[in-house]
Image (tube, grey):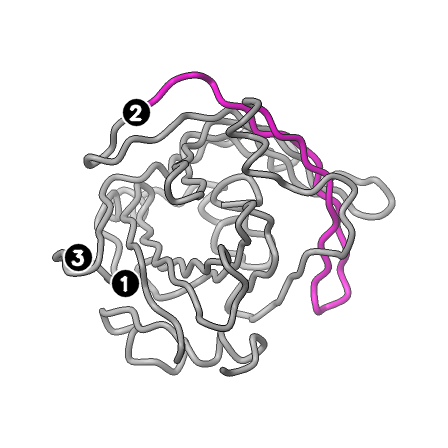
Amino acid sequence: MISRALLPLLFLASPALAGSFTPPEGCTTTLTVQSRGCYVANYYTCEKDNPGDKWRADFDQEGMFYLSKIDRETQWIESYDLNPTIKQTLDPNPADPANFSSLLATGRDDFDFGLTKDNGEHTNVKGYDKLTGKTVTIDGVTLQQTEYEYAETDDAGNELRKSHGHEYVSAEWRNFFSGQSEWWDGTQWLPLEGSPVQFYMPGEKGFAATQPIFECDAVMSQATPLDRLWHASANRPLLASPKE
């Protein structure tokens, strides 16, 4: 299997960007999710990864912009921002690792961990996820709603970004999915809506799509400050808490 460092280059050179997602050799696409806010995500697993590990490749109308890997407990193991390509990894021995099992069992999970980018930047992420007790059904899939809040700081304690809002979790898939959130841009809270609209399983029409279909006209016509932040790759807010 190819080096993880080469994954973004593989995807950028792949004909999958023309319309049908193809994961790296030895990997299998398991789920495609079309969401509000004009993006589509393809989830896949790889034979040589640890059991429970999964990857997610996010696409907007211009192609893939984000690639991430989580483990069974939804720890944010590895991610890539693209254009330019920046790799970010979870630091060893987090103070309070994300624990999806704890969230499901107790209704709340607090997390506190560090992240390091290959450009030398180091940040610290601290926050929580909490089940609200509400369930929703989207496209036939039952999800539990969560409340979350987190802040990301540099090593001097300066706040770089923060967010709060609601997300959804699937106990069966052990995944977070985006919901309604707000992001602090330094002067004001900006809303972001990335809730899933349709789920596609293998064999279904729309599976492995790389073109988003929901709210793309609205995104193109409304260049909000958050849109500009979103497309500034190095500073893009996460689609969810840093464990989706």
Q: Main secondary structure of the magenta part?
A: strand
Where is mark 2, residue-wise? 136
**Residue 207 vs residue 117, the one in the foreground:** 207
Q: Residue at x 34, y 64 (%)?
A: 62
Q: Distance from label 2 to label 1 (Cα)?
A: 26 Å
Quadrant assignment, res 134: top left
The kind of residue tagged 2 is Val
Using residue 159 as the reference point, say whether residue 144 is left or right of it: left
Q: Distance from label 2 to label 3 (Cα)?
A: 22 Å
Q: Is residue 32 magenta?
A: no
Q: Is residue 131 above or below residue 96?
A: above
Q: Residue at x 25, y 36 (%)?
A: 141
The kind of residue tagged 3 is Gly
Where is mark 3, residue-wise? 206
Where is mark 1, residue-wise? 210
What percent of the width, then of the height, locates residue 148?
55, 28
The kind of residue tagged 1 is Thr
Q: Which mark sits nearer the N-terminus, 2 or 3?
A: 2
Q: Nearer the viewer, mark 2 or mark 3?
A: 2
Q: Nearer the viewer, mark 3 or mark 1?
A: 3
Q: Residue at x 69, y 42 (%)?
A: 97
Tag 2 near tag 1, CB within 8 Å = no
The residue most toward the right is 156
Say few, some or many: other residues with alpha carbon within 10 Å of mark 1 (under 14 / 14 to 19 / 20 or more). Answer: many
The residue most toward the top is 133
